[in-house]
Image: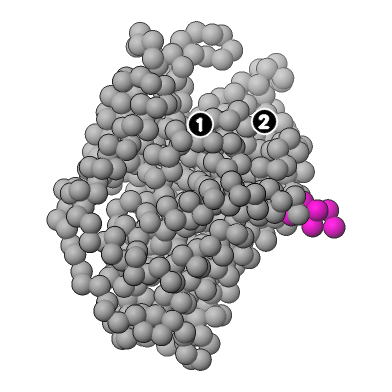
Amino acid sequence: MELFDHLMLGFSVAFTPENLLYALLGCILGTLIGVLPGIGPVPTIAMLLPITYVLPPVAGLIMLAGIYYGAQYGGSTTAILVALPGETSAVVTVLDGHQMARNGRAGAALAIAAMGSFFAGCVATLLLAAFAPPLAEVAFKFGPAEYFSLMTLGLVGAVVLASGSLPKAIAMIILGLLLGMVGTDVNSGVARFDFGIPELQDGIDFAIVAMGVFGFAEIMTNLEQKENRVDITDKIGSLYPNKQEFKEAAPAAVRGTILGSMLGILPGGGAVLSSFASYTLEKKISKNPERFGKGHPAGLGGPESANNAAAQTSFIPLLTLGIPGNAVMALMVGAMTIHNIQPGPQVMSSHPELFWGLIASMWIGNLMLVVLNLPLIGLWVKLLKVPYRILYPAILVFCTIGVYSLNYNTFDIFTTAIFGVIGYVWSKLKCEGAPLLLGLVLGPMMEENFRRALLLSRGDFMTFVDRPLSASLLAVAVFLVVIVALPSIRKKREETFVEEE
């Protein structure tokens, strides 16, 4: 009954004209960036962070959340029609979705993707509403030692589940932690690592790093690539899957929803890992695995459901524990801190309208996305005709304006450009930016809780082991490190991400 009352509060907040408008705007922008290859939710949210300064907290977070899960929808449209995944998690969608389109079943493929995404989004939002309150109650029992151990586990999980080289992921995490130490020490008031530059005494702004590493660098990487225009499928066909297609796609969508919901909660999991894991699962349990890659509905319904479920359950650790599980959630932390809201269990008690309004808006947003994706397919695919050489410089200008509006300081623009060049070099070296971002966000929080725990224990390092919950979290982190170091597990991990490469 209490959950029902909370949801009613959430819908009363989400159904205000202002919040409905921002939910719609977020869904449209999310679908747009999902459709356009090379522009993902991370650089887009990074670009729009300055805008949240002038928005009410609830409206700003509703819009940013809509961009995130909207991108999962939009990425499937071009993946199916033109074999160009607009979002990383839609790479798997190309395998069977585009084959269905080539077989004259483009409409059915789009409908399967939309319905699977809608079902997964609704279920995942229900799980978020159901499990967030009890998790938040547990989180209130956390002290500084437990929070430090939890953040350590989060960073270890991000490394273990990151695609690519483990040493590179670890190096990026450490670099992010070091960048988080730049600025004035909160306890002593002494400036650290500022190199005598006054602008660095307040630290390196989170949005500047995100916009440089993900926005500027992504644009530079895409501009150097030759445009690969593929003829759009002329005939969309019926938007209704036939009985056999529905029979094969529906169970896969249910399994993808369950798998994505679980993986979305894990640090570093997210939509990309979920979609690949779902496709692998469907292929393993299928009686006819040879059909995959040739237009099998299960190879489309499962991953599309998984990535949308993961996108929404990834809000659970953010809202209940204050721990971002992936780069997008790290940006959401930035958006909340802009409004002096500390992510964590206190959000539910001190800002119930924000917490439940955000959850309710996800249901509304999922319904909006179904309406946007199916009837407006023609509009979305026409956007692909805009030359990249025009599109990307325009985004670059928008980025620059956004950076300048943070502090109205040209130093921020130069700093972003430097991080853009560095991010471009990292992309050439196959170094992921997401672990860096997580390290940058969690670093100051880890340091604060680490020092606070030692102050309370009078310098006794055993406090992290003596407290049962803290010791358990550290034990899980050590277990993950040991497991991933095993040769057989490392080989399996490389095989899991080989398609992504």
Residue at 56%, 58% in the rendered image: 365
Q: Which residue lies furthest to the right in this view?
A: 1
Relative to 102, is 182 on the left or the right? right
Q: Looking at this view, is 310 or 409 the one in front?
A: 409
Task: For residue 349, say whether it is visible.
Answer: yes
Rendered position, 382 above or below 428: below
Task: For residue 282, say whether it is visible.
Answer: no
Rendered position, 121 above or below 215: below
State the mark number for residue 53: 1
Q: Looking at this view, is 125 or 153 the one in front?
A: 125
Q: What residue type is labelled 2?
A: Ala
Q: How busy is the neighbourhood of tag 1: few (under 14 within 10 Å), some, or many (20 plus)?
A: some
Mark 1 lies on a secondary structure that is helix
Rendered position, 382 above or below 465: below
Q: Where is residue 354 in the image (x, y as percent from the top left)?
A: 66, 42
- Name the residue carrying label 2: 145
- Say if the magenta span includes residue 370: no
Relative to 457, is 421 on the left or the right? left
- Residue 239, quarter of picture: bottom left
Q: What residue type is labelled 1?
A: Tyr
Q: What stretch is highlighted in magenta?
A: 1-7
Q: Residue furthest bottom?
A: 243
Q: Position of residue 36 (x, y in %)?
A: 31, 57
Q: Earlier in the sequence, mark 1 or mark 2?
A: 1
